[in-house]
Amino acid sequence: MKQFFKKILLFVPFCFALYLIGIVVWGEFIPSRYINNLRYKIGSIGQMQLRLQEAKRIKNVDILFIGSSTAYRGFDTRIFKKYGINSFNLGSSAQTPIQTLYLLKRYLMEINPKLLVIDANPLMLSIDGTESALDIISNDSFNKGMVDMALSINSLKVYHTLLYAWYASAFGKDKLPIDTVRNGDKYINGGFVEHELAFFKHINYEKQEWECRKIQLRAFDKMIEYLNTIGVKYIIVQTPITPKLYASFANNSFINSFLEKRGSYYNFNQLLTLNDSLHFLDANHLNQQGVEIYNNMLAEILLKDNLF
Amino acid sequence: MLFNSIDFAIFLPIVFVLYWFVFNRNIKIQNLFLVVASYVFYGWWDWRFLFLIALSSFIDFFVGILLSKTDIERNRRRLLLVSIVANIGILGFFKYYNFFYENFVTAFTFLGFSIKANTLKIILPVGISFYTFQTMSYTIDVYRNKLTPTKDIIAFSAYVSFFPQLVAGPIERATNLLPQFYRTRSFDFDNSKEGLRQILWGFFKKVVIADNCAEIANLVFNNSADYSGSTLLLGVICFAFQIYGDFSGYSDIAIGTAKLFGFNLMRNFAYPYFSRDIAEFWRRWHISLSTWFRDYIYIPMGGSRGTTWRKIKNTIIIFTISGFWHGANWTFIVWGFLNAVYFLPLILTDKNRINLEIVAKQSLFPTLKEFFQILLTFLLTLVAWIFFRSESLMHAFVFLKGMFSVSLFSLPHFSGIGRTVPIAFLLTFMIALEWFNREKEFALSNFGANRTTLYRWSFYSLIVFMIGMHMQTNETPFIYFQF
């Protein structure tokens, strides 16, 4: 028995060492589409690398926007500029409250906004956050906060990618230059991503429900607690999705009730009247025409209500 | 509790340590601890169904005792009947009630009678087909005087509920497993190492092969009307390896885990896809079930002795029952029947026992003839798997029609085609390793005995790495749990 345990105790670190080497070798040589559980992709959808590079330089803005793709495709900093509002958009692909909390802890103090606008997309409350974690790990420089985020998500894919990111950071492989225009997306200084003008062909949906995960609801509360602790002023908004899709959810009142209790809340699905085709590039994202209507309205509310 | 879950990863070491260090003084206490651990293992899924296992154990234990107290044949038969009716009754209610009821309603509706259908929402208890068969084998063996009935209810309960094989086999015989609960177990280093190797290989087959093949198989079977013949063929090939990896992987984990506790379970798979004919396939696939049917149904019916008609009848009956055991659906019955059709030419020409040894024994590669025999057998099993996997007979026939169409000769095409590259690589790895170790109990058995520790450990680490890189991040249940 003693020998059995001794062998196991020796094998475990041996295996772990080879495992780490394997992660590096695979990450280096095997195309990511062939690997299930390692996804290190610099500058993937959402142009997060460019945004984070800029975030490190930005200081003292009026407004910081944060949220998922509905945020980085929904808040055009150029429109707010016309109202004399300096802003930065820290949205990222499929960003859930777990990642929002990570980004705030890492960048909020430096950016030092007068007002934080949290885009609370209910869909992001119903996913586990793996996709967004992979995006951030691949595009941010390696730091301890990533480990906390990985532990919150507790996914093998995130752990592997984190280990590879650690190696990439140590050997300077995390600084690949990327284009500002990719797949019809153009990165605009300030964090906004403008998509080529497109129109969505509306479809009908069956009745459905937002299925929020407890872990994301808890992360949302932690984020609010964090903001209250450091005394940052914030509002919560819901960027509009196509009216038909929004109407298909039977429990919108639950989401409204949850968000209302956590701060000043503006649901633009209810405040704005938009057209499924004319104002959207897909079911979840505004096109540039929709962005202009939405941002103009938001800017007017911000100014009228003296929110910053 | 699933083997491929964090729960089990915590459960197993705790039980292992308590078993060998805390409850090792007395065999009865050690057995009692195994019963408790097994009930926790099972109750993790749904504790209410523990009652069924306990009931099944009590009935067969007392029937065994009563059988030992009487020599009157009529009474002995009655006791045996009590056990069979109780076990089949439990199985029948939970697994087959709705099937029979729905078919009854359909038949009467067809004849012009109107019957209101009220099916029950019955939850199928995990592994019910396995443990009821295991307990029945005990009573039948006692009835046949092949086994002395036990008076130790704890050992018997441990035999029925032994957690490594409780929910998906191997379906153990009392003659093999029960005596192991009477003997004092001592920790065997080599056997435990072998157990860990077998667990590792089982995990590889389950989480790497089965779960990845399932992705494609599910996609193709769930949207079969949209795909070309070649894509459908690819889907059914993936299903063939999914079910093999899933079930043989479970068996390997079960057998390996039992070894850690000082038990030897029967072999359940012996490289079935290297078989040269269907008879050989059935000697190598789900061996514990095939031999159960052989010993307790087929041979008592006369087996392959007697007239040609009797051989045909017995073969069809045994395969059809085997199909029905897998699930309450006509697809399983047709799957069983189809295998009987494959089997009949061999049994009628007395060629069902010509391939008893593993193929190409002591050779590196098979002969061309053997290769084509293996290929043909595999193709026959593929056609049968279509029925096994399909939702209904109609689905299966449409699938077959789509597969055997001109588009069979086109290139497969579907949204996840890129995933086939790593899966093909992983399958090649598994097949090669199994082929070159086909004379052993399992592919990693006694692996690298003449090599250095560094070589062996590096290889095991490679397998651990492949599991880590290719496992699905959500827990996926084993297919055979539903049986």
Image: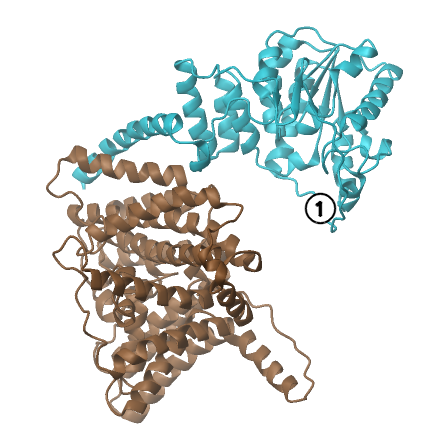
Chain colours: A cyan, B brown
Residue at image location 61% in from the left, 13% down from the top? A107
Residue B15 seen in this snapshot: no
Mark 1 secondary-structure assignment: loop
Position of residue A212 in the picture relative to residue A169 (left or right): right
Chain for numbered disc 1: A
Q: Vertical placement of B288 versus A118: above or below? A: below
**Residue in front for this viewpoint, A171 or A220:** A171
Residue A306 figure quarter: top right
Say few, some or many: other residues with alpha carbon within 10 Å of mark 1 (under 14 / 14 to 19 / 20 or more). Answer: few
In the picture, the quarter occupied by the C terminus of chain B is bottom left
Q: Position of residue B274 (x, y in %)?
A: 26, 60
Position of residue B443 in the picture relative to residue B135 (left or right): left
Q: Position of residue B139 (x, y in %)?
A: 30, 78
Position of residue A60 in the picture relative to residue B129 (left or right): right
Q: Vertical placement of B312 versus A235: above or below? A: below
Residue at image location 70% in from the left, 32% down from the top? A121
Q: Position of residue A254 (x, y in %)?
A: 75, 40
Q: Position of residue B51 (x, y in %)?
A: 46, 66
